[in-house]
Amino acid sequence: MIWYKLLSFCKRVQKREPENSEEVQSLLVEIDEVKKSIDAARSNFNNVTDPDSIDYYTYILKAYQVRHDMLIRQLKAIMA
């Protein structure tokens, strides 16, 4: 559900031609990279069993999610 909302937001952003289009494009690329990192970390989290690895991937997932939220806020601020 969240990814669908993000995708629809990104499509709306791409239709506009703001003054900061290079910055917008770089943010969109970075958001996509963070999304891929989240998917990889989630997959790794689902495949580990020892407590240290679980803690590690929990921390990594939270860090990527915070970064993703920050990038989305930056993108919304530019588009506002």
Image (tube, grey):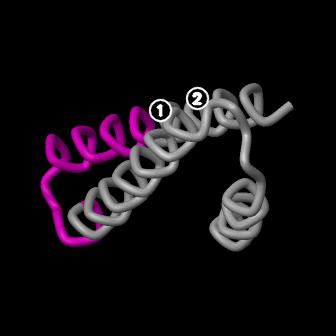
Q: Give neighbour class at mark 1: few <14, some 14-19, many 20+ (Cα, 10 Å).
A: some
Give above or below for 28 relative to 19. below
Rendered-image quadrant of the N terminus: bottom right
Relative placement, left or right, of 41 versus 78 is left
Q: Badge 2 is on which residue? A: 70
**Mark 1: secondary structure:** helix
Q: Does 77 lie within the magenta span?
A: no
Labelled disc at residue 67: 1
Q: Does 57 lie within the magenta span?
A: yes
Residue 7, quarter of the rendered image: bottom right
Inspect the image, locate mark 2, and give the three-letter code of the amino acid beneath it: Met
Please report the bounds of the magenta region as a residue range. 45-64
**Mark 2: secondary structure:** helix
Secondary structure, magenta segment, majority class: helix
Instruction: Return the residue nearer the eye: 46 or 69.
Output: 69
Relative placement, left or right, of 73 versus 59 is right
Where residue 13 appears, as percent x and y from the top left, is 73, 54
Which residue occupies 44% across, 38% down?
Answer: 62
